[in-house]
Structures are given as structure tokens and as C-alpha cells.
Image (cartoon, grey):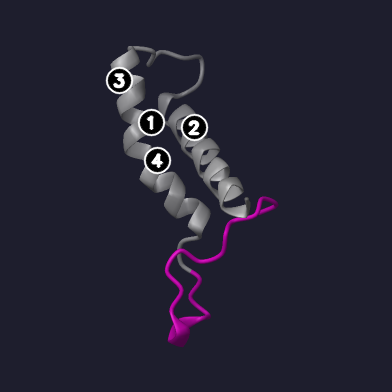
Amino acid sequence: MSKETGGQAFPHENHLSHRGMTLRDYFAAKAMHAVITDWLNTGDIFQDEEIAEVIARDCYIVADAMLKAREQ
């Protein structure tokens, strides 16, 4: 993956070979509820793309912004 992922979300000293979820993935998963709720509240759920793909993209936009904010 070309984007900075923030490293492991839940690093474990004894299991370094098992990478698990990245911090970017964790942030995206945490943003998912808010993004879905926003979509449902605005009624803007009909797009040319599949709804799930748009929601996933929006979650990663939020995750990338969170990673950027950590750098400041």
C-alpha cells in the first residue's frame, strides 16, 4: 500500500510476525458508524457507485485526515 498506514493498531511484542489491522484501518472502522449515520440522515444514499464503496472511501478519507492530524 502506498499510503502511510500508521503502523499496527494493536502491536503485540510476542507476535510481530502477525501484523493484523493497521492504524489507518482502525481509524476507518471507527469512522464507519458516523459516515453511515450521516448518509442515512441526509437521505443522500443514491449514487452512481455502489453505496458500500462510497461509504468505504469516505471512511478512509476520514482515517487519512486523522493520520495527518497526528503528524502536527
At label 2, the amino acid type is Asp
Badge 4, how many Cα within 10 Å: few under 14, some, many 20+?
Answer: some
Q: Residues within 10 Å of mark 2 (few under 14, many from 20)?
A: some
Q: Secondary structure at mark 4?
A: helix
Element on which disc 3 rests: helix
Instruction: Kindly report the distance in space between the C-alpha atoms of the residues bearing marks 1 and 3.
Output: 9 Å
On the image, numbered disc 2 is attached to which residue? 58
Tags 1 and 4 touching, CB below 8 Å: yes
| Of callouts 2 and 4, the N-terminal one | 4
Q: Quadrant of residue 32?
A: top left
Q: Looking at the image, which residue is at 49% across and 32% down?
A: 58
Residue 63, placed above or below residue 14: above
Which residue is under mark 3? Answer: 40
Dominant secondary structure, magenta: loop
**Residue identified by numbered label 1:** 35
Q: Which residues are magenta?
A: 1-19
